[in-house]
Image (tube, rainbow, N blue to C red):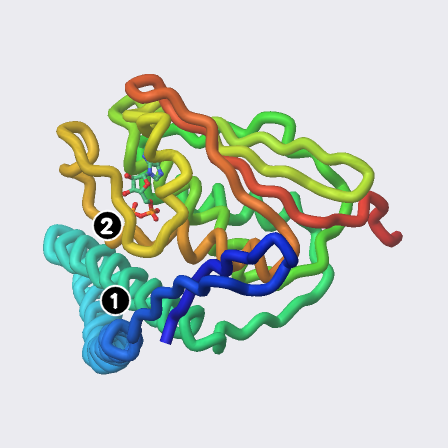
Amino acid sequence: IRASGKVRYTNEGKPALIIGVSFDITDHKNLQQQKDDFISIASHELKTPVTSIKAYTQVLERMLKQKGDEREAAMIAKMDAQVNRLTSLIGDLLDVTKINSGKLQFNDRVFAFNELVAEVIEELQRTTEKHVLINNVNYTGTVHADRDRIAQVITNLISNAIKYSPLPGNIIVSSISTENEVQLCVQDFGVGIPADKQELVFEQFYRVSGDKQHTFPGLGLGLYISSEILKRENGRIWVNSVEGKGSTFCFALPASPVTQA
Ligand code: ADP
């Protein structure tokens, strides 16, 4: 039951009138639970066959390369890339069910922030002809957080910058550090986000609708997951964007500026 109400008092301060409303939200909660359960079961069930397809495509690609069948090997490599996309979509759905049930695990440790940024950029640069330019990522301190989860956040922001910008679509990654935090910003010159939608993009399943935005594939989960990860790591995430001009997504994490020798 969700209830709210107001009390009117007499001049002597005694309650004279109580007005209240109560809603039975049991149905709403059940529906929410059913939705969460469905996403959880479906994503678990999808994971097994996709993992198996992934293993076979890799074996096939290797076999074809060994035989010198370059054209067929290239086709299998494309298939493998699509399987990776599927794996990542299923991974996002699984993460959401874990977030909703409070079961997203974190394994925090100390790591060099810059090295992680460089690693992620290198990996993503291999998947796109757009240029991911590194500008001023020269922070030498460390961060205490879950390295894989922070990699996931950086990957989300750069992948979005790539996805939502037309060619040539340069992307600029830069960082600023203060005494106790490090900030990383990813700037693109793509479609941008209307001002009234900028807060909403961090919500679960939210996707900006409109002519320019609807053609891009996605589930609307990456930024929600990223903001939940940053919440758990005592960080924050925000966006500055101008529709039609581009967006800059930034996040901040608590950090120690001095690296141990
Ligand atoms: P997805 O990209 O899968 O839809 P996200 O949670 O990553 O999900 O992003 C939510 C929405 O925010 C996107 O659907 C898109 O409308 C908008 N968005 C995110 N990043 C950008 C960007 N760099 N440029 C323009 N729009 C963006």
Residue sitting nearer the eye, 60 or 172:
172
Residue located 54% across and 62% down the image: 148
At label 2, counting other C-alpha atoms closer than 10 Å, the crowd grade (few under 14, some 14-19, many 20 or more) is few
Residue located 25% across and 38% down the image: 208
Q: Position of residue 140 (x, y in %)?
A: 76, 41
Q: Is residue 160 left or right of residue 177?
A: left
Residue located 31% across and 61% down the image: 88
Q: Position of residue 85 (x, y in %)?
A: 26, 57
Q: Is residue 101 left or right of residue 51?
A: right
Three-letter code for the amino acid on which mark 1 is drawn: Arg
Distance between mark 1 and mark 2 Cα atoms: 30 Å
Q: Secondary structure at mark 2?
A: loop
Q: Is residue 90 above or below residue 226?
A: below
Dots 1 and 2: beta carbons under 8 Å? no
- Which quarter of the image is occupied by the N terminus? bottom left
Q: Identify the residue at the far top of this view.
A: 245
At label 1, counting other C-alpha atoms closer than 10 Å, the crowd grade (few under 14, some 14-19, many 20 or more) is some
Q: Is residue 221 above or below residue 127?
A: below
Q: Is residue 64 visible?
A: yes
Residue sitting nearer the eye, 110 or 97:
97
The tag earlier along the polypeptide, 1 or 2, is 1
Q: Is mark 2 within 8 Å of ligand 1?
A: yes
Residue sitting nearer the eye, 238 or 31:
31
- Indicate the quadrant where residue 193 lies: top left
Three-letter code for the amino acid on which mark 2 is drawn: Gly
Q: Secondary structure at mark 1?
A: helix
Residue located 62% across and 50% down the image: 235
Residue placed under numbered mark 2 in the picture: 218
Residue placed under numbered mark 1 in the picture: 62
Q: Is residue 57 left or right of residue 7?
A: left
